[in-house]
Each structure stands twice: as structure tokens, then as C-alpha cells.
């Protein structure tokens, strides 16, 4: 564990309590009504730089226009950028299109579930791979963003800064230890929801 303050009792307590809270209090968001890896990927790409309330209408329009990976791969880049316009961060939209083209070329149009295969795609890092693998595929995969970092810092009373790589590595170890084999997607979304709404 590399010194991460996680014992078996804490793990059980946090897992069960947090998932119960999430199922009772979670917001009804369009990407939570699906297990489609593509739609979860698009939502995560948008939410990394945009607030939830802002992202919702753009997510829905994007999915209406480009409902699957093959349609994104085929779309002219200018059309993709137009759908992304108000969200800014055009580099992210270009990476999405490049990744979709690679998924079609290498994986037959189906987003892979393996961490290495996902992280080999343009624009998909450790966080996004963890979100896709746990939420869409139900695989035991950790994730860490600023919200999750805050949850861990407060729950475990740990000092640390999101901007310091040493602290991020320490908190990733906690995320790895905590993510459960059952319902990892709900657990990870619960962490993000708690960080967004409470912490």
C-alpha cells in the first residue's frame, strides 16, 4: 500500500456507506442512464473541463449528431469542432476524433476494455481509462480527479496538493486499494459525486 492509511475495516465502511449514499442522492444525469462505453467516454471528455450543468445540453447534442464511434470517426473534423464549440478546449475534440478513427481501424469500432489498449488511444489517460473501465465495463479500475483527491484528503485527514505529483501517486494508491470488485462504477461515481456536491 506504500503507506496509504487504508485498513480492512475502513475499506468496508467507506465502500458500503458511500455506495448507499450515492444510490440515494445521485443526480439524474444523461450519461448515468447508459452503460455504453462510447457515451461514457464522451461525457468524461466533456466533464474534465466543464461543469455538469454546462455539459448536459452539449453532451445531448453531440450524441444526437454522432451517436456512436463510427459516426464520430467518419465525421469531418470541422463538424466535430462545431459540436464542441462552446466547450472550448478544441484539442480535446481533435483527440476524440483521432481516437475514434483508431478504434475503428484497430478495434473494429468497439472501445476496448483493457487499460493498456485504452491508454494507447489519443487523449485517454489514467483517469479516463479508469472511468470507462469501471462504469461501462464493470471492471475493478481506480480513478482519481480533483474531486476524488479532496474526498480522500478530508476522509483520511491527509495533507496534500493536487498539483504535486508525489501526492497524486500516494492518493492513487488509496484509490487502487478502495475500489471494490463488485459495482466499481457506482463506487467511483460515488466518490466523484461526493467530491462535487459535498467536499
Image: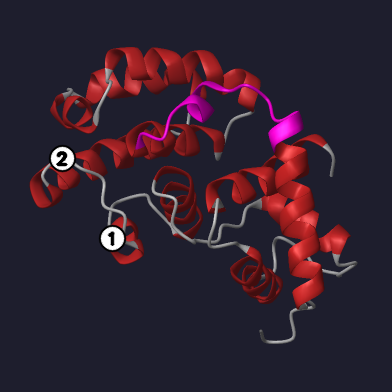
Q: Which residue is mark 1?
A: 120
Instruction: Kindly identify which numbered label has been placed on residue 156.
Output: none
Q: Which residues are magenta?
A: 23-36
The 10 Å Cα crowd at callout 2, few under 14, some 14 to 19, many 20 or more, is some
The 10 Å Cα crowd at callout 1, few under 14, some 14 to 19, many 20 or more, is few
Give yes or no for residue 25 being in the magenta stretch. Answer: yes
Distance of mark 1 from mark 2, alpha carbons?
A: 15 Å
Q: Residue 45: x and y, percent?
A: 45, 38
What kind of element bears circle 2? loop
**On the rendered structure, is 199 left or right of 190?**
right
Q: Earlier in the sequence, mark 1 or mark 2?
A: 2
Q: Which residue is mark 2?
A: 109
What kind of element bears circle 1? loop
Q: Residue 43: x and y, percent?
A: 47, 32
Figure check: 129 above or below 157? above
Determine the residue positioned at 55% across, 40% down: 48
**On the rendered structure, is 180 left or right of 163?**
left
Amino acid at each position: 500500500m506504500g503507506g496509504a492509511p487504508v485498513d480492512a475495516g475502513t475499506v468496508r465502511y467507506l465502500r458500503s456507506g458511500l455506495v448507499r449514499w450515492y444510490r440515494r442522492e445521485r443526480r439524474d444525469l444523461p450519461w448515468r442512464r447508459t452503460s455504453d462505453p462510447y457515451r461514457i467516454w464522451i461525457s468524461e471528455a466533456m466533464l474534465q473541463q466543464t461543469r455538469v450543468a454546462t455539459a448536459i445540453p452539449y453532451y445531448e447534442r453531440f450524441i444526437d449528431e454522432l451517436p456512436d464511434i463510427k459516426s464520430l470517426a467518419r465525421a469531418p473534423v470541422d463538424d466535430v469542432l462545431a459540436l464542441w464549440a462552446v466547450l472550448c478546449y478544441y484539442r480535446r475534440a481533435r483527440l476524440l476524433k483521432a481516437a475514434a478513427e483508431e478504434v475503428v481501424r484497430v478495434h473494429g469500432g468497439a472501445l476496448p476494455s483493457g487499460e493498456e489498449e485504452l491508454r494507447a488511444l489519443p487523449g485517454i489517460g489514467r483517469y479516463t481509462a479508469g472511468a470507462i473501465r469501471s462504469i461501462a465495463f464493470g471492471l475493478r479500475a481506480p480513478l482519481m480527479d480533483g474531486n476524488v483527491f479532496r474526498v480522500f484528503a478530508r476522509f483520511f485527514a491527509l495533507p496534500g496538493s493536487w498539483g504535486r505529483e508525489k501526492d497524486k501517486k500516494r492518493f492513487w494508491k488509496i484509490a487502487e486499494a478502495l475500489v471494490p470488485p463488485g459495482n466499481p462504477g457506482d463506487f467511483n461515481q460515488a466518490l466523484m459525486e461526493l467530491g462535487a456536491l459535498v467536499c
